Amino acid sequence: MDLDSIRQQFPALQQQVNDHPLIYLDNAATSQKPEVVINAVERFYRYQNANVHRGAHQLSEQATSAFEAARTTVQQFINAASEQEIIWTRGTTEGINLIAQSYARPQLKPGDEILLTELEHHANIVPWQIVAEQTGALIRVVPINDNGDLNLQRFSALLNDKTRIVSLTHISNALGTINPVAGLVRQAKAFGAIVIIDGAQAAPHLEIDVQRLGCDFYLFSGHKLFAPTGIGVLFGRKTLLETMPPWQAGGEMIKRVSFSGTTYNDLPFKFEAGTPNISGALGLAEAIRFLTALDRKALAHHERALMNRAVELCSAIPGFSRIGNPTACASILSFQLSSHHQQDIGLMLDQQGIALRTGHHCAMPLMERLGLPGTVRASFCFYNTMEEVERFARVLEQISLGRSFAVAETVSEQSIF
Ligand code: PMP
């Protein structure tokens, strides 16, 4: 793996922040974008800009075929059986809301159960609370073990004949926990439940095969996968999507409109009301081509090595405590330092050009379960280097030793090492 040449393709990684080379460890929030993605978006607006599916002119025809080819790229990326199973969304959040309102709301009756887990992002909690209120369905929550793993016995025990929906994350954005989703899907399907997987964190790190997973719905966001913001994907099994009513209505999602009635369009357009994010879809297809042209096994191996090194170095820092399972987790290191509040750690790292996230990570119920106000979260990507991880750990150690970096003033690299 030629890390230098990979890094060269990400312009944002080349900059200085607070007079230090940027060390970007906030990849779970959003990833940086490679040149090819930036160029695809620029090319669209410079030369290809036209609306899709409706123009009588060449630009529109070209935009439409590029847009639909992007859908095929996504279909192949997650091994969906048909392009009709790929619905463009704004992101994971919109996808879950679509399922909650279009699939769940008409189906659920009072007393039906929706099974979630303590690991969920708010995007996989609040849409279900709304639909539970609308229908009288009940939310059940699978607890975690103290180490941050899902309690698999409790998962099995909570499944029952009233379980209509199981919606869970593939990888926790707060702790990095990887759920054994294929087995969980099988168990839930045995009770006739519909299974939804929030793949926001998994799509950038794991190879996703929705047919092998056997889930009914799978969601992810382009922006965590090296693509622009505002584009995402909802995979849904065709037989289910066909039975679902449209969620949003307007242009594109219809075949014929009259005041006496409207005929809806075929899949996937039935769920794509209004002008879509065309440049975003082209950017996402380009990001997928970029990623799949690399050796993904080598990328995963490198990310694991970064994570192992970070854990090794940070564990030796006085007052460092890791939150989450040390063995089974993706490229996320969630932690606290006993000496400092998490927000102060974030600010001091930022002064040193190190970007990461602090707080509840949109997982307040998880923080409550762990009895924590929040954590510091370093999240790694294949474009991070071992040197970056080592510098991050050195700065963290300095912080723990009481070497505070004044927030308002810039500290030169030499003054630390
Ligand atoms: N689920 C998980 C696990 C996430 O990490 C995120 C993004 N932090 C979301 C859902 C929501 O994604 P988006 O904001 O892109 O819709």
Image (tube, rainbow, N blue to C red):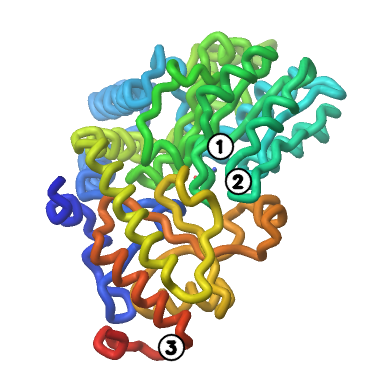
Report the residue at 86% width, 24% height from top. 111
The residue pinned by badge 2 equals 121
Which amino acid type is marked by label 3?
Answer: Arg
Tag 3 near tag 2, CB within 8 Å: no
Q: For mark 3, does the 10 Å Cα neighbourhood hold few (<14), some (14 to 19), or many (20 or more) residues?
A: few
Residue 295 on image: x %, y %: 20, 36
Q: Measured along the vertical axis of the image, is residue 72 above or below residue 366?
A: above
Taking depth in this image into account, of 311 and 7 the one nearest to the observer is: 311
Q: What element carries label 3?
A: loop
Which amino acid type is marked by label 1?
Answer: Thr
Q: Is residue 124 left or right of residue 75?
A: right
Q: Is mark 1 on a helix, strand or loop?
A: strand
The N terminus - image quarter:
top left
Which residue extends farthest front? 316
Residue 357 on image: x %, y %: 49, 63
Label 2 beta carbon less than 8 Å to ligand 1: yes
**Disc 1 to disc 2, C-alpha distance:** 8 Å
Report the residue at 37% width, 40% height from top. 205
Visible in this render: residue 176? Answer: yes
Label 1 beta carbon less than 8 Å to ligand 1: yes
Residue 311 on image: x %, y %: 40, 60
Query: Residue 351, located in which quarter of the rendered image?
Result: bottom left
The residue pinned by badge 3 equals 403
Tag 1 near tag 2, CB within 8 Å: yes
Q: Measured along the vertical axis of the image, is residue 222 above or below residue 189?
A: below
Please report whichever mark, 1 or 2, sits nearer to the chain's N-terminal start: 2
| Picture disc at residue 169 | 1
Which amino acid type is marked by label 2?
Answer: His
